[in-house]
């Protein structure tokens, strides 16, 4: 994907915070995911309308004192991996706020 990347939480995922971690369970196959504090920030901000670059610059870089290029590369890898498991929808254009079920990333 080039340009902006947008992320949206999938509807078929249940989330529960445990300390600084976020536990996710996929309703489609009962897979469990444990997200660390940084990944949880991405999950919380996955509204489908805010570009990933903006989420990283606003929510991650100032808090964790990491440069934007490194943080964005790591965030890209993470969201694409979560999309492969159907946890997030990923698109190069804004996604409407109605998460959909399914295991595929939302692409044009």
Image (spheres, helix red, strand yellow):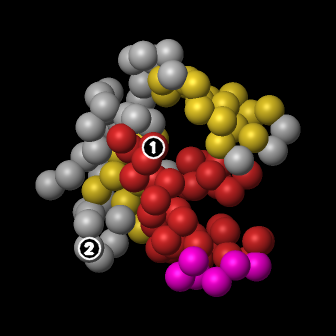
Q: Quadrant of residue 104?
A: top left
Q: CA distance from mark 2 to mark 1?
A: 18 Å
Which mark, residue 2? Answer: 2
Magenta span: 65-70
Is 11 rendered above or below residue 107?
above
| Residue positioned 65% across, 68% down in the render | 59
Q: Is residue 8 visible?
A: no
Q: Percent from the top left, x then y, of residue 72? A: 51, 72
| Residue positioned 36% across, 41% down in the render | 84
Q: Nearer the viewer, residue 101 or 98?
A: 101
Which mark, residue 82? Answer: 1
Q: Percent from the top left, x then y, of residue 42? A: 57, 55
Q: Residues within 10 Å of mark 1 (few under 14, many from 20)?
A: some
Q: Is residue 74 visible?
A: yes
103 horizontally vs 60: left or right:
left
| Residue positioned 77% across, 71% down in the render | 63
Question: Quadrant of the image for the N terminus?
Answer: bottom left
Q: Count up the numbered dots.
A: 2
Question: Quadrant of the image for the C terminus?
Answer: bottom left
Is 1 rendered above or below residue 86?
below
Residue 68 on the magenta span: yes
Q: Which one is earlier in the sequence, the residue at label 2 or at label 1?
A: 2
* Mark 2 element type: loop
* Mark 1 element type: helix
Q: Quadrant of residue 71?
A: bottom right
Q: Percent from the top left, x then y, of residue 66? A: 70, 78
Q: Residues within 10 Å of mark 2 (few under 14, many from 20)?
A: few
Q: Percent from the top left, x then y, of residue 11? A: 41, 29
Looking at this view, name the residue that lies furthest to the right. Answer: 19
């Amino acid at each position: 994907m080039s340009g902006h990347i947008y992320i949206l939480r999938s509807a078929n995922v249940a989330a529960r915070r445990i300390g600084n971690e976020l536990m996710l369970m996929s309703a489609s196959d009962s897979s469990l995911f444990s997200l660390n504090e940084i990944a949880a920030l991405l999950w919380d901000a996955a509204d489908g309308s805010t570009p990933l670059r903006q989420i990283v610059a606003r929510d991650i870089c100032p808090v964790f004192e990491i440069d934007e290029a490194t943080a964005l590369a790591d965030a890209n890898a993470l969201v694409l991996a979560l999309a492969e498991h159907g946890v997030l929808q990923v698109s190069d254009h804004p996604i409407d706020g109605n998460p959909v079920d399914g295991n595929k990333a939302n692409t044009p």
